[in-house]
Image (cartoon, coloured by chain):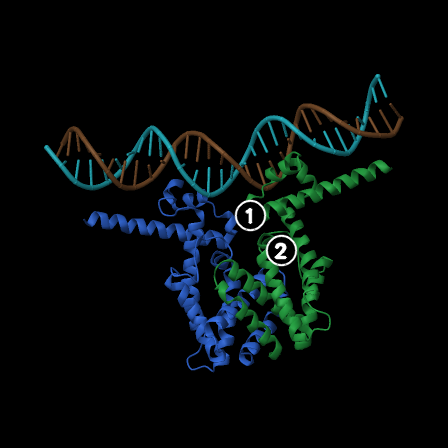
Chain colours: A blue, B green, C cyan, D brown
Amino acid sequence: MGISERKERERLEREQRIVAAARTLAQRDGWASVTVRRLAQEIEYSQPVLYAHFENRDAIVGAVALEGFAELGPTLRASVRDGAPPIDALRDVATAYLVFAFERPALYEAMFVLPSGLRFAKSDTPKVLRDTFGAMMVVVEPFCSDPEVATEYFWAALHGLAELERHGRIRASHRAERVRLIVAMFATGD
Amino acid sequence: MGISERKERERLEREQRIVAAARTLAQRDGWASVTVRRLAQEIEYSQPVLYAHFENRDAIVGAVALEGFAELGPTLRASVRDGAPPIDALRDVATAYLVFAFERPALYEAMFVLPSGLRFAKSDTPKVLRDTFGAMMVVVEPFCSDPEVATEYFWAALHGLAELERHGRIRASHRAERVRLIVAMFATGD
DNA sequence: TTGACAATCTAGCATCGCTAGATTTAAGTT
DNA sequence: AACTTAAATCTAGCGATGCTAGATTGTCAA
């Protein structure tokens, strides 16, 4: 009886090692370098073992993405000082979101760009995802009549800023001005 | 002398056939199905011939992306009625942008998501790219003090809306409300 | 007709995601 | 303690991929 518990514990540990290896490797060399063979070598097991944990490579990306969401929500909440004026809160969350995206590009890619098998805005949306959405809605709410739609738009604007800058489509040098703009528009907009 | 001209003409024709095949195939079966082998078969030449036209697969994606930009600019301009009030123009461009993105997801992906070797906001930015940016700046300008930054933000917001909806991150059913929001914010914002 | 050069193809390398089937390891039973 | 059975794990390989070296064909000018 204790045996099967130990095995399950070891199983979970190994799974965590796979996800951690994927994340580290992606951060260092990009997701293209994260191959199943390479991960197997990293955790010192043969390839097929990985498929006992994840259905396919995409599912590994999805596991890393979930970690990302688990971190993004709290990061956003932590960026707001207690009792800060709504407009400061809005600016701080916007800034924190972009900092998150630029400081961990591989993690952000897993969350929003790569195929990961994750599903959003559906009934089976995991709690971490709803929490992240909620962290943004909290600061958007004071300014908008329909918080849900406004938060979707807020998120989209931030995501667009992150992606276009990451791909060199817009000037990195003017990031601060764009943040000023998004905050100003939400503050006076709807 | 006419001979070398004919050869150059044939060369360009073949190149165009490669790009067209890539675009068609991507639209029908997704970019993952666009393999160099498959394209070679489509144009009835052997694989190495493709490498006489493009440095690598990414460059083929880039060629399709360029076609996309060449179409997006005029599409945006055409969406604005002559003499329309600035706010209508803004809404029409926003709508046209999203329609473009959703009606040609594979093309949009080539332009903004996939590695394509294209460079923006740099000195060597091709004319079509600048034209597309210009088409957006025209309708943003009336509302903003710094048109360049505002257009970057406008573009980013639209791109974010397109991407998050394409990935099912936000509710497709509320697209119209989000467009209303972005227009309202630009109209009253800065 | 021949020689040279360009155009094109065949064949193959290294790598990928993924899996069937053999093999080892460990657990439970006499 | 030896045996049986089942779980855990590995070896080996399939069918793809992007890309390329080297052979082969075709096309010109001398």
Estimate the x, y position of residue C22 in percent, counting from the top left: 33, 28
Q: Residues within 10 Å of mark 1 (few under 14, many from 20)?
A: some
Residue marked by disc 1 = B30
Q: Which mark is residue B64?
A: none
Q: Nearer the viewer, residue A138 or B174?
A: B174
Q: Nearer the viewer, residue A45 or D1?
A: A45
Q: Distance between the residues labelled 2 and 1?
A: 14 Å
Estimate the x, y position of residue B91 in percent, counting from the top left: 62, 70
Eyeballing the image, is A131 above or below A87? Answer: above
Estimate the x, y position of residue B19 in percent, counting from the top left: 67, 45
Eyeballing the image, is A180 above or below B122? Answer: below
Q: In which quarter of the image is residue B16?
A: top right
Q: Is residue A148 visible?
A: yes
Instruction: Count numbered badges in the picture.
Output: 2
Q: Which of D26 and A169 is in front in this view?
A: D26
Chain bearing tag 2 is B
Eyeballing the image, is C18 above or below B111? Answer: above
A186 on left or right of C30: right
> Which residue shows up at 62% across the image and 55% down it?
B111
Q: The residue tagged with tag 2: helix, strand or loop?
A: helix
Estimate the x, y position of residue A87 in percent, counting from the top left: 50, 80
CB-based contact (under 8 Å), mark 2 and mark 1 = no
- In the rendered structure, which amino acid carries the disc numbered 1? Gly
Residue marked by disc 2 = B111
Q: Residues within 10 Å of mark 2 (few under 14, many from 20)?
A: many
- In the rendered structure, which amino acid carries the disc numbered 2? Met
B88 on left or right of A118: right
Q: In which quarter of the image is residue C23?
A: top left
The label nearer to you, 2 versus 1, is 1
Chain bearing tag 1 is B
A151 on left or right of A15: right
> Which residue shows up at 63% across the image and 49% down it?
B61
